[in-house]
Amino acid sequence: MSQHPPAKPWFWLRGDTGAGNALTGARRAAGLTQAQLAAQLGVDRTTVITMESGRNAAVSRLLRAFNWMGYDLIAVPRTARVSVDLHPGEA
């Protein structure tokens, strides 16, 4: 019997804290601490804390702009197959 790796979660990046929440969830799913992620990115741990708390003004504005125009950004694992139904309920 073959073993499949556990499925990685996907994240909805909505609102001012959407990106931070997604980053926290993805980091935890990867089993990384903030310090480990910071080392991989070549930044200080405080930078990761700032990103996860949603205090990155540029990212928050970007998400707000997409959300205001009626779009959501979604982070999915690279191995995921994604399908979008633009007209739900129609057959």
Image: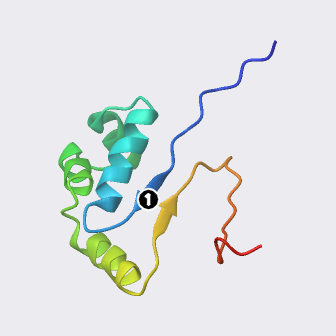
Which image quarter is the N terminus in? top right
**Residue 61 is drawn in which quadrant?**
bottom left
**Residue 24: image location, x then y, percent:** 33, 45
Name the side, left or right, on which 11 lies relative to 90. Answer: left
Residue 38 versus residue 26: which sits nearer the camera? 26
Query: Mark 1 — residue?
Result: 12
Mark 1 is on which residue type? Answer: Trp
Residue at image location 59% in from the left, 28% down from the top: 6
**Residue 83 is drawn in which quadrant?**
bottom right
Q: How is the image coloured?
A: rainbow
Assess disc 1: are there few (<14), some (14-19) or many (≥20) residues with their C-alpha within 10 Å of its C-alpha: some
**Residue 58: image location, x then y, percent:** 27, 75
Residue 81 versus residue 32: which sits nearer the camera? 81
Which image quarter is the C terminus in? bottom right
Residue at image location 67% in from the left, 49% down from the top: 80
Q: Is residue 79 above or below residue 50?
A: above
Residue at image location 34% in from the left, 34% down from the top: 36
**Residue 63 is drawn in which quadrant?**
bottom left
Q: Is residue 22 above or below residue 5?
A: below
